[in-house]
Each structure stands twice: as C-alpha cells, then as structure tokens.
Amino acid sequence: MWDTVGKFNEWQHIITSPLQRYQAFARALGERHGINVGVEPRFKEVGFGSWEGLSHDDVKIGRADEYHAFLKDPVNHRPQGAEVLDDFIHRIGTAYDETIERYRNKHILVVAHAGVIRAVIAKTVQVTPTGLYRIKVSNGGITRIRHTKAGGRLELLNGRLSN
C-alpha cells in the first residue's frame, strides 16, 4: 500500500475499515502527513460464513463446485452462513453515502477491503449484485471515484499514485 500511495498526501481525511491491519496503515499514513483518521465499522468485509479463514486456493480448489456456483450467481449461491449480499451492499452503501455527505467537497481516502470497494464501485456504476464479483480489485490498488452534482463517476481502478 505504501508503494501505491507513494508521496501523495492531498487527502483531507482518511476513513478506514475496523480491521487492525487496515487501521495500522491508515493511522501510519495519517500520522506521516498530518491527516485525521476515522474508523467506519460498517466498512468491514462481507462475511463469508463457512469460507472465513480459508485461503483463496482452499476455496477455489478444495470447494471447486461451491466456488464456481458462487462466481456464477453470488446472490443465490453464498457460502453456508455467509452475510446476505443485499444486506452487505446496503450496509456499505449506507456507510458510503453518509461518508460522502459528511465530507462533501473534501478529498478523502477510504482504506478498505476488496469487497467493500466492489460494493462502492457497483453502487457508483449501477452494477447488479450478481455482477459484484466480476469487478477485479487488486490488493493495494487505488480506486478513485469523483462525486459531483450529477453523482459519482469511477475515474481509476487498481491504480497507483505518482511519486
């Protein structure tokens, strides 16, 4: 993540997931540049139920039939005990809308999980829940969404900021 942000420091506020490793990065970045950091508990990753704690390969290889059914239809083929996708999307959408309203006309950084970023992108470009997992979000990448009176516009996906 440090390589991705480089020396860029034009954010006016940083919002982070409650997960410790995300908070650690956000707080260190905020401290380095004198930027306030807040935690948004609703920006935690989607709950994956029986897949929690498993590696991508454990699921992709060890539970191949479940995995492929999930990719084809993530709404109706959730892992056992997983968070309902519509509930997750609603949770993220509400938190995101409130964040955008609170920091209107500010340049903010949200440090969050791939699923959270997918949900925000899907909301912005009006992707259905079924298409959520067809959005590739790279670890440590920057996604930029600009908000105007006309709404949000996806400007960058999986990018890096120049040093």
Image (cartoon, rainbow, N blue to C red):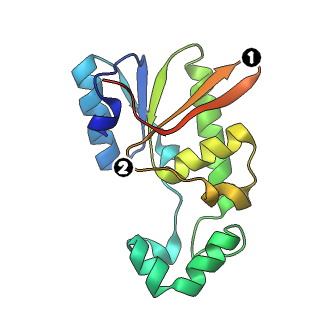
Q: Amino acid at mark 2?
A: Leu
Q: Residue under label 2, please give it.
A: 19
Residue projecting furthest to the front: 162
Q: Residue under label 1, please give it.
A: 149
In depth, the one of 22 and 71 nearer the eye is 71
Quadrant in which residue 149 is drawn = top right
Up-down relation of residue 2 to residue 51 (above or below): above
* Quarter in which the N terminus is drawn: top left
Q: Residue at x 72, y 61 (%)?
A: 130
Quadrant in which residue 94 is drawn = top right
Left or right, 143 with reference to 122 = left
Q: Nearer the viewer, mark 2 or mark 1?
A: 1
Q: Amino acid at mark 1?
A: Lys
Q: Position of residue 158 (x, y in %)?
A: 48, 42
The dot on residue 2 is none
Left or right, 111 with reference to 7 = right
Left or right, 150 with reference to 159 = right
Q: Position of residue 79 (x, y in %)?
A: 57, 76
Q: Residue at x 72, y 40 (%)?
A: 125
* Quarter in which the C terminus is drawn: top left
Q: Position of residue 17 (x, y in %)?
A: 42, 43
Q: Residues within 10 Å of mark 1 (few under 14, many from 20)?
A: few
First reached walking from the N terminus: tag 2 or tag 1:
2
Q: Position of residue 30 (x, y in %)?
A: 29, 25
